[in-house]
Amino acid sequence: MRLFTAILLDERNKASMYDTVLRLKENAGKGSFTAKENLHLTLNFIGETKRLEEVKHAMQRAVRKAGAKSFCLTLQGFGKFN
């Protein structure tokens, strides 16, 4: 299984981002575009693993230890994976 950490978007933000995806798709000429229901913001790619439960527990411990809190996020600009 491919694992990554990500920020999941609410429907309002997902719709807004998807409008941009559609505009890019019209003008890009080629490329692969994510379906609206799969839109998210990837924070980091962990990789392939079969140790799902072990990774899940380690991530939960890290979040608790970090004292993670809610936050606001402002989006602007574009980027790509190399």
Image (cartoon, rainbow, N blue to C red):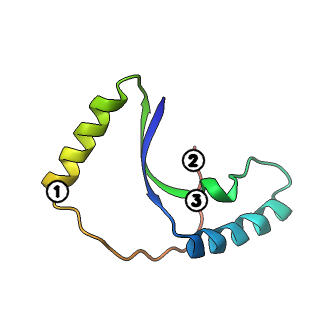
Tell me what residue is drawn at x 58 percent, y 70 percent: 11
Check the picture and name the quadrant holding the C terminus. Answer: top right
- For mark 3, give the secondary structure: loop
Tell me what residue is drawn at x 58 percent, y 76 percent: 12
Q: Is residue 58 above or below residue 10?
A: above
Task: Give the alpha-carbon distance from disc 3 to disc 1, as whole Å.
Answer: 28 Å
Local packing at callout 3 (Cα closer than 10 Å; few below 14, some 14-19, many 20+) is few
The percent position of residue 10, horizontal first and vertical second, equals: 52, 69
Local packing at callout 2 (Cα closer than 10 Å; few below 14, some 14-19, many 20+) is few
Which residue is denoted by mark 2 in the rendering? 81
User: Looking at the image, is mark 1 or mark 2 nearer the viewer?
Assistant: 1
Which residue is denoted by mark 3 in the rendering? 79
The percent position of residue 50, horizontal first and vertical second, equals: 40, 22
Q: Earlier in the sequence, mark 3 or mark 1?
A: 1
Q: Amino acid at mark 1?
A: Ala
**Number of labelled discs?**
3
Task: Classify residue 28 as left or right of residue 81.
Answer: right
Furthest residue to the top?
50
Furthest residue to the left?
65
Task: Classify residue 26 as left or right of residue 42.
Answer: right
- For mark 2, give the secondary structure: loop
Q: Is residue 13 above or below residue 54?
A: below
Task: Classify residue 55 as left or right of residue 80.
Answer: left
Which residue is denoted by mark 1 in the rendering? 66
Task: Give the alpha-carbon distance from disc 1 to disc 2, as whole Å.
Answer: 27 Å
Tell me what residue is drawn at x 68 percent, y 52 percent: 34
Find residue 67 and report its image quarter.
bottom left
- Marks 1 and 2 in Cβ contact (< 8 Å): no
Q: Amino acid at mark 2?
A: Phe
Q: Is residue 50 above or below residue 14?
A: above
- For mark 1, give the secondary structure: helix
